[in-house]
């Protein structure tokens, strides 16, 4: 398991290559990349600032990945999340899941993103023509995370 | 001593990112701490009324009725918006 919080950009190709080359049992590698859009809630976005809670962020992401490792048979997981100043088209987050087969890799990748959106302490602030504003949490994200709840869990 | 942290819109609202506070007498949970902070008046009065206020104790997200004890790190913030 690898969890990284960084200001710097990342290269998806080399990150995925390193992940798959580390273990020849890997038969499936699913990945998701989240990007900064230039529009949000009808307003133009010229830049974004991502704040986080150092210490808790790493713990929360490790706990989410740990839960994925318990639910599915996975070989390795990589999560990179950027913080600081970002511009439209910039990469924000990479989640990559390596498994023997695709079903586990696809499911765990979606699960990790859904939980990251609702449980990892990051906050986005957007700069629009009307000024800077904090991004509001979306109910759709809560519902997306809710669908992974297990009976009694 | 408690360490209290404020993030994002909550930090801007109270105008403070962090503080150390001697655990006030009679405060045993997060809700009690919010009541205590509200006595400062001004923006602090509104802290407990922030819709969907989130809280973490020792870097674990918890409900507002969760207990706190001397030495804890308590954080207040809005719903998260990463990813």
Image (cartoon, helix red, strand yellow):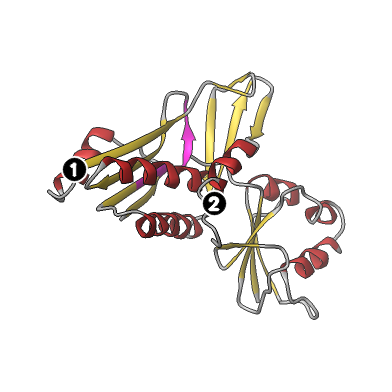
Q: Residue at point 31% right, 42% down?
A: A103
Mark number displayed over residue A27: 1
Q: Mark 2, residues whose alpha carbon is within 10 Å: few (<14), some, or many (≥20)?
A: many
Q: Earlier in the sequence, mark 1 or mark 2?
A: 1
Looking at the figure, which quarter contains the N terminus of chain B? bottom right
Snapshot quadrant of residue B9:
top right
Question: The disc numbered 1 marks a residue on which chain?
Answer: A
Question: Is A66 rendered above or below residue B9?
Answer: below
Q: Residue A61, percent across and down?
A: 44, 54
User: Can I make out residue A138 in this image?
Assistant: no
Q: Is residue B78 left or right of residue A116?
A: right
Question: The disc numbered 2 marks a residue on which chain?
Answer: A
Q: Nearer the viewer, mark 1 or mark 2?
A: 1
Alpha-carbon distance for marks 1 and 2? 29 Å
Indicate yes or no whether the magenta region holds residue A46: no
Q: Residue B71, percent across and down?
A: 61, 77
Q: Which residues are magenta?
A: A79-87
Q: Residue B15, percent across and down?
A: 72, 50
Question: Is B41 rendered above or below residue A92?
Answer: below
Q: Residue at point 41% right, 43% down?
A: A81
Question: Is B42 rendered above or below residue A132?
Answer: below
* Discs 1, 2: same chain: yes
């Amino acid at each position: 398991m690898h969890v990284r919080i960084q200001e710097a950009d990342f290269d998806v190709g080399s990150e995925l290559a390193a992940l798959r080359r580390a273990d020849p049992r890997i038969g499936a590698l699913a990945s998701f990349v989240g990007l900064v859009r230039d529009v949000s809630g009808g307003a133009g976005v010229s830049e974004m600032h991502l704040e986080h809670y150092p210490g808790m962020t790493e713990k929360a992401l490790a706990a989410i990945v740990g839960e994925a490792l318990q639910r599915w048979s996975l070989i390795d997981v990589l999560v990179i999340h950027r913080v600081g100043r970002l511009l439209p088209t910039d990469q924000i987050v990479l989640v990559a899941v390596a498994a023997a087969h695709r079903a586990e890799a696809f499911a765990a990748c979606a699960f990790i993103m859904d939980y990251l959106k609702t449980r990892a302490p990051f906050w986005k602030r957007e700069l629009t023509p009307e000024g800077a504003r904090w991004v509001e949490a979306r109910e759709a994200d809560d519902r997306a995370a809710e669908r992974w709840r297990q009976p009694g869990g | 001593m408690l360490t209290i942290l404020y993030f994002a819109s909550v930090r801007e609202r109270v105008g403070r990112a962090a503080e150390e506070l001697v655990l006030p007498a009679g405060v045993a949970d997060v809700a009690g701490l919010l009541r205590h902070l509200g006595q400062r008046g001004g923006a602090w009065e509104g802290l407990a009324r922030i819709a969907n206020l989130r809280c973490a104790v020792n870097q674990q997200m918890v409900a507002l009725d969760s207990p706190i004890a001397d030495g804890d790190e308590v954080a207040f913030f809005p719903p998260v918006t990463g990813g």
